[in-house]
Amino acid sequence: MGAPRERLKVAEFCKEMGISRSTFYEWKAKGRAPRCRKLPNGELRIDRADIELWYDSLEVAA
């Protein structure tokens, strides 16, 4: 069995990215946030792998 995946809470993601929760939810509404998973209790989690894919997709040519 592989290593467990790291899953961040929205607050943890926001802190890491230096953004507010409202910015995260604005990005999410516009389809610009990394992929999220909704737990049965309604909380969101973001897999580290999805964050890395999302962040790589933001690269701009110099």
Image (tube, grey):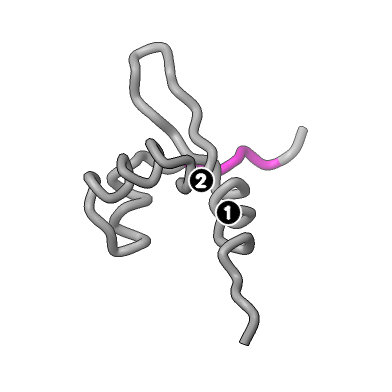
Up the image or down, 62 lies above or below 22; here it is below
32 with respect to 43 (left or right): right
Q: Nearer the viewer, residue 33 or 62?
A: 62
5 with respect to 8 (left or right): right
How far apart, in angstroms, are the residues tagged by discs 1 and 2? 5 Å
Instruction: Tell me the quarter of the image containing the N terminus.
Output: top right
Residue designated by label 1: 54
In contact (CB < 8 Å): disc 1 and disc 2: yes
Which x, y percent locates residue 41? 34, 14
Which x, y percent locates residue 39? 43, 19
Which x, y percent locates residue 54? 58, 54
Instruction: Tell me the quarter of the image containing the C terminus.
Output: bottom right
Which x, y percent locates residue 28? 40, 39
- Label 1 amino acid? Trp
- Sequence-wise, the earlier of marks 1 and 2 is 2
Q: Residues within 10 Å of mark 2 (few under 14, many from 20)?
A: many
Residue at horizontal 27 percent and vertical 50 percent from the top:
23
Residue designated by label 2: 34
Q: How many marks?
A: 2
Residue extent of the magenta highlight: 3-7
- Label 2 amino acid? Pro
